[in-house]
Image (cartoon, grey):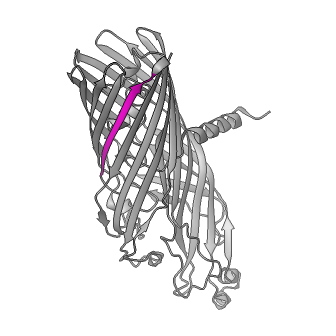
């Protein structure tokens, strides 16, 4: 019989495949949230939180909801562009073509989520949901050209010099409880499973003269792991027309374990091995591959949000949210490696230098009832979300390249027999951002990719709900 740990891993993997496959971020590597109505209102939802997605935004909003089940599907079209302008002489960066614009692969990425609510009584509602709180992704081809002219490697350097793919799934049981006629509170538990693949070009000293002074390496971390967290919320009814919502999401660490695959592309210069015959095999062309074990603790930051919703007229509700995210705690991710490098030496630990900065996001939204008989609504919103990424850690593996503006709009309609249908569209866009080569941690190597960066993402989503 398989162990309970294996069964749990299989369960999470299958659920992950069914619910998420995404490459877009709201800030850093967190997503913009969940729920058709909430996303159409640009996240101005903590003071409303009147559907299943309250489990993400403000669990206190579950109170009073009817028994329901929701399924959400969205399609994302993200794009990142960079025009390198590398002026640093740091070895390895001669592999970028200055002045030539490159872009991530043009792909459509599906994503999904699921929610279930159960009203136990007038004062207590239970919920269960599956969603993705974080994801990261970028796929580049030909951005890094590899070894310089004269290196004479017989194996072509891979076109996939930069690649990242992080998916986190959150299994989220939740409870909402009414304290009195004005105050409700809520608590959610996060059981998170993450899968990560990070790939980047690298160089290691060879001890030979230029252009052989550095060997060229393609390194990939592949792994998975678990993390646990929680969120709490409060909803307070100030007046019949105004609600205030507060929510806090605690920090989570995904403990990743896996392998670090390293491929060393060797120069074809046999004569250089004569000075040290033990290293002659390192100058005969071809490749050497090793797969030492690797592990890393990948952090998801805590955040605090406050929102107010005001029913301006019988048919119009407006909302405003502000969210503080503690990205400043996301500093350096150490990748611990256990095994030998391709040169035969013990592999050294590596660091993913992030040094992110705290951010404050502002969201505005509205909900307009157009037809009361058919419960037909038009919703929309706008948010401004600063990028937490400083110039010194902007690199191709991270898609969040600048402060983000989002415009969104959606429709909802109550169908017959308890069914409902919602659809929405989001447009995230940024101004261009120009950065110079920076050694952010002062260790003698460049930590970013200098140049001009741009980013946008289009998202189309649909949600089907059923009240029972």
Q: For residue 233: magenta?
A: no
Q: Residue furthest left?
A: 312
Task: Answer with the quarter of the image where residue 82 lies.
Answer: bottom left
Q: Tell me: residue 155, above or below residue 301.
A: below
Looking at the rendered structure, the number of numbered marks drawn on it comes to 0
How would you classify the magenta stretch by its main secondary structure?
strand
Q: Tell me: residue 137, above or below residue 243.
A: below
Q: Is residue 258 left or right of residue 109?
A: right
Q: Residue furthest right?
A: 1
Q: Measuring 36% from the left and 30% from the top, which residue is drawn there?
A: 248
Q: Looking at the picture, how far across and down is residue 9, in whole percent?
A: 65, 38
Q: Tell me: residue 150, above or below residue 182.
A: below
Q: For residue 408: magenta?
A: yes
Q: Locate the N terminus and report the quarter of the image it occupies.
A: top right
Q: Measuring 60% from the left and 50% from the top, which residue is drawn there?
A: 223
- Front position in the image: 42 or 337: 42
Q: Measuring 48% from the left and 50% from the top, which residue is drawn there?
A: 23
- Front position in the image: 405 or 353: 405
Q: Measuring 43% from the left and 35% from the top, which residue is drawn there?
A: 34
The residue segment tinted magenta is: 404-415
Q: Looking at the picture, how far across and down is residue 268, in whole percent?
A: 64, 85
Q: Looking at the picture, how far across and down is residue 237, in whole percent?
A: 26, 17
Q: Looking at the picture, how far across and down is residue 168, in whole percent?
A: 52, 42
Q: Tell me: residue 423, above or below residue 338.
A: above
Any part of residue 41 in sight: yes
Any part of residue 303 in sight: no
Q: Is residue 334 left or right of residue 7?
A: left
């Amino acid at each position: 019989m398989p162990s309970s740990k294996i069964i749990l891993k299989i369960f999470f993997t299958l659920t992950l495949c069914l619910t998420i496959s995404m490459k877009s971020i709201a800030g850093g590597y967190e997503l913009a949230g969940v729920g058709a109505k909430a996303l159409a209102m640009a996240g101005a939802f903590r003071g409303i939180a009147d559907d299943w997605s309250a489990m993400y935004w403000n669990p206190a909003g579950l109170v009073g909801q009817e028994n329901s089940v929701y399924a959400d599907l969205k399609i994302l079209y993200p794009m990142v562009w960079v025009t390198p302008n590398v002026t640093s002489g740091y070895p390895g960066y001669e592999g970028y073509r200055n002045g030539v614009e490159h872009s991530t692969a043009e792909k459509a990425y599906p994503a999904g989520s699921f929610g279930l609510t159960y009203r136990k009584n007038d004062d207590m509602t239970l919920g269960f949901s599956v969603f993705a709180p974080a994801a990261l992704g970028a796929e580049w081809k030909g951005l890094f050209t590899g070894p310089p002219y004269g290196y004479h490697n017989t194996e072509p350097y891979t076109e996939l010099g930069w690649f990242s793919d992080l998916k986190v799934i959150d299994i989220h049981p939740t409870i909402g409880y009414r304290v009195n006629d004005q105050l409700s509170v809520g608590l959610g538990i996060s059981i998170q499973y993450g899968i990560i693949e990070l790939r980047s070009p690298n160089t290691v000293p060879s001890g030979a003269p230029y252009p052989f002074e550095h060997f060229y390496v393609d390194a990939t971390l592949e792994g998975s792991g678990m993390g646990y967290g929680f969120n709490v919320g409060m909803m307070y009814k100030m007046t019949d027309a105004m609600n205030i919502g507060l929510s806090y999401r605690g920090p989570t660490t995904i403990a990743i374990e896996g392998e670090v695959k390293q491929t060393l592309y060797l120069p074809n210069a046999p004569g250089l091995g004569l000075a040290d015959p033990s290293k002659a095999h390192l100058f005969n062309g071809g490749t050497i591959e090793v797969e030492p074990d690797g592990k890393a603790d990948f952090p998801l930051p805590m955040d605090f949000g406050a929102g107010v919703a005001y029913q301006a007229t019988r048919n119009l509700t407006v909302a405003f949210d502000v969210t503080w995210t503690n990205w400043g705690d996301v500093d350096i991710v150490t990748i611990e490696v256990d095994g030998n490098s391709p040169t035969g030496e013990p592999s050294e630990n590596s660091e993913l230098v992030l040094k992110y900065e705290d951010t404050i996001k502002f969201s505005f939204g509205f909900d307009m009832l157009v037809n009361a008989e058919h419960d037909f609504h038009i919703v929309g919103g706008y948010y401004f979300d600063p990028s937490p990424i400083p110039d010194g850690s902007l690199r191709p593996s991270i898609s969040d390249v600048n402060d983000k503006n989002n415009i969104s709009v959606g429709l909802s309609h109550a169908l017959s027999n308890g069914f409902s249908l919602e659809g929405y569209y989001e447009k995230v866009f940024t101004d261009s951002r120009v950065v110079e080569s920076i050694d952010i941690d002062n260790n003698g190597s460049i930590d970013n990719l200098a140049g001009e960066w741009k980013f946008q993402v289009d998202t189309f989503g649909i949600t089907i709900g059923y009240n029972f």
